[in-house]
Image (spheres, rainbow, N blue to C red):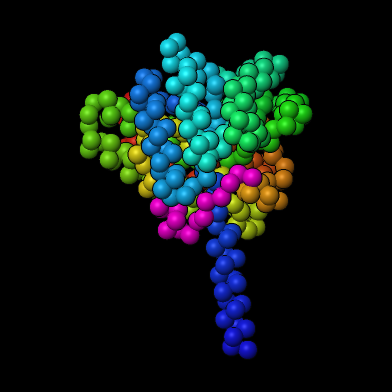
């Protein structure tokens, strides 16, 4: 009997650990932020990949192919996507030029998807894989239910699965300040912004765990959204370590989407994208947005200035 109790305790412990899972998804490849020079873009992507390899994180990056085409740099920029695949990561479609479905005619938006997957699909095929996932820019899924349904039917016909998001931490706010500090050579400010970003991100994970308990009734595999930028090049490692300390394991998007929670109805229609956890809780998006952890007031003040 004592041995059985011990075995049951171990099984329960393993189950709890397995429930705490997260997918790391990185948008706007090959660059996001104020820096446009090739050398910096290459450095940021290299750091992101090296960090993922160090922590054994199977990252998926979502590509805006329009960023690949610069005179005299096209081959080097395309090589960055090959580097992602050679590192064992996955790639998805984020449209060609990052428009919002909220204010883009549907036919034009479909063209953005088709145009935005040409090269990425080819390098995936060369690597023995295929294009499977689409991420909406701004997480906007359409201005109305009819447009959304039509677009989702188009995606399904093209073989795409939508890449949802349950956790994000407004890294674009922090990165704007971080990039400015980089330009000014202000290492003290870089440290403050980076560390505040990490703590806010980990707090958002705690929050979304509680939201999942309320909306779904249990823990789910989370999907985290951030961007390929200087901030994440330097601070994703701290986030990964923080998540490991919280008991998370890193999984693929394919594995996460096997959870039946991701088949729940998305009730949200609006200009701005929100977490899928909020979308699944019909009529309560504003309640969640008003009560979620706020960004540090000093960070917000600097960003708004």
Would you say residue 240 sits in the magenta stretch?
A: yes
Residue 126 visible in the picture: yes
The one of 168 and 52 positioned closer to us in this rendering: 52
Please state if 123 lies on the left or on the right of 142 as rendered: left
Q: Nearer the viewer, residue 125 or 91?
A: 125
User: In percent of the image, x 48 and y 26: which residue is there?
Assistant: 79
Estimate the x, y position of residue 235 in percent, counting from the top left.
Answer: 36, 42
Task: Write down the region rendered in magenta.
Answer: 239-254
- Which residue, as the protein is rendered here, is positioned at the far bottom? 1
Place residue 301 in its image quadrant: top left
Residue 93 lies in quadrant: top right
Quadrant of the frame with the C terminus: top left
> Is 32 placed above or below 170 here?
above
Residue name at image x 55 percent, y 57 percent: 20
Q: Position of residue 203 (x, y in %)?
A: 44, 50
Q: Please, is residue 71 above or below residue 164 in the view?
A: above
The image shows residue 53 at horizontal and vertical percentages of: 44, 45
Q: Quadrant of the N terminus?
A: bottom right
Q: Residue at x 40, y 52 (%)?
A: 241
Q: How many discs appear?
A: 0
Q: Is residue 202 visible?
A: no
Quick one: 53 or 6, which is closer to the camera? 53
- Residue 128 locus on image (x, y percent): 63, 36
Verify whether residue 187 appears in magenta: no
**What residue lies at 45% left-to-right and 10% top-to-bottom?**
71
């Amino acid at each position: 009997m004592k041995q059985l109790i011990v075995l049951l305790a171990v099984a329960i412990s393993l189950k709890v650990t397995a429930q705490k899972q997260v997918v790391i998804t990185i948008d706007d490849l090959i660059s996001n932020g104020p820096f446009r020079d090739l050398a910096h873009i290459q450095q940021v992507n290299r750091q992101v990949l090296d960090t993922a390899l160090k922590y054994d994180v199977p990252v998926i990056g979502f590509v805006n192919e329009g960023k690949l085409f610069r005179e005299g740099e096209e081959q080097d920029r395309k090589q960055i996507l090959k580097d992602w695949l050679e590192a064992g990561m996955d790639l998805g479609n984020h449209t060609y030029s990052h428009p919002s479905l909220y204010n883009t005619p549907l036919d034009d938006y479909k063209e953005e998807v088709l145009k935005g997957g040409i090269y990425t699909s080819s390098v995936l095929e060369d690597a023995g894989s295929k294009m499977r996932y689409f991420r909406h820019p701004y997480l906007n899924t359409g201005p109305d239910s009819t447009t959304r349904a039509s677009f989702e039917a188009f995606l399904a016909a093209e073989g795409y699965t939508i890449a949802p998001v349950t956790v994000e931490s407004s890294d674009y706010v922090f990165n704007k300040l971080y990039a400015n500090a980089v330009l000014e050579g202000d290492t003290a400010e870089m440290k403050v912004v980076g560390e505040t970003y990490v703590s806010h991100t980990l707090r958002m994970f705690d929050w979304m765990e509680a939201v999942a308990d309320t909306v779904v009734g249990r823990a789910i595999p989370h999907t985290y959204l951030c961007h390929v930028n200087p901030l994440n090049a330097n601070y994703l490692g701290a986030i990964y370590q923080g998540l490991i300390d919280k008991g998370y394991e890193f999984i693929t998007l394919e594995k996460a989407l096997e959870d039946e929670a991701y088949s729940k109805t998305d009730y949200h229609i609006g200009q701005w994208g929100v977490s899928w956890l909020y979308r699944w809780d019909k009529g309560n998006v504003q309640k969640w947005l008003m009560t979620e952890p706020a960004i540090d007031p000093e960070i917000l003040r600097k960003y708004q200035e």
